[in-house]
Image (cartoon, rainbow, N blue to C red):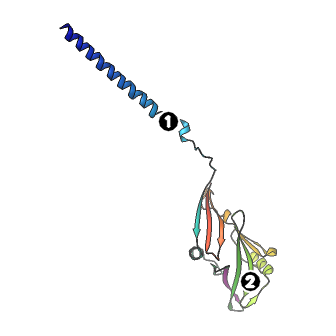
Amino acid sequence: MKNKARAWQITFFSLLGIILVVIFTIFMMFQRYLPEVTDEHFMQHSKGTDEATFTIQTNKQRLNQLIASRIKEEPAEMPYMVELLEDHVQFRSAISVLGQRVPITINFLPEVLENGDLLLRVETFTLGLLNLPVEQVLQLITSWIDLADWIITYPADRVVEVKVTSIKLDENESIYFKFTTFDLEEDLIELEMVIQ
């Protein structure tokens, strides 16, 4: 009977020892492979910036559709249209001269500035079949038409600056656009949408 009791005690303590070793092993593995989360876990490892940038690529046809829809949404006293052609941007409108509607056409050569704004160099300005001096006409347009705050004319330089970086899309002014490529001949127009 003593041998049975002794065998029982050895078996019991052996089993208890095995259970304790298994529990200790599981606890150590849990501590090693499942550590508690630290603040460093939620920190960005690569150097980030204060803004996110997304590239948008389009072509003349799509941008022409967008421009046309925006013009329709905001009708003006003097109807007009802006169209991207093979190698230039064209503004078309009409004015009343002696009771007759006469077409106005302005052709611009686009250029992307370093800051992402668009500079439109006036190539020609025609009223009907007459070529008019660009400097004087730009001065008249500036005083005659109420342009948006983000469109600035420089009559002496014969340019119009479209400050797309100043157009804010949300009330917090945290989203804006800037051009990176405006190549009409290659039909490639790229913008960056920047979220601050």
Residue where numbered disc 2 is placed: 125
- Which mark sits nearer the N-terminus, 2 or 1? 1
For the record, the magenta segment spans: 90-96
Residue 146 visible in the picture: no
Q: In which quarter of the image is the C terminus?
A: bottom right
Relative to the observer, which residue lies in front, 5 or 78?
Answer: 5
Q: Which amino acid does label 1 sit on?
A: Val
Residue 8 horizontal side relative to residue 102, left or right:
left
Q: Is residue 130 above or below residue 58?
A: below
- Residue 187 visible within the image: yes
What secondary structure characterizes most of the magenta part? Answer: strand
Q: Which residue is at the front of the view, 191 or 185?
A: 185
The N terminus lies in quadrant? top left
For label 2, count other residues whose C-alpha is less than 10 Å away and answer few (under 14), some (14-19) or many (20+): many
Residue 125 vs residue 44, the one in the foreground: 44
Picture coordinates of residue 106 (x, y %)? Answer: 71, 81
Q: What residue is shown with label 1? A: 37
At 63% from the left edge and 75% from the top edge, which residue is drawn?
186
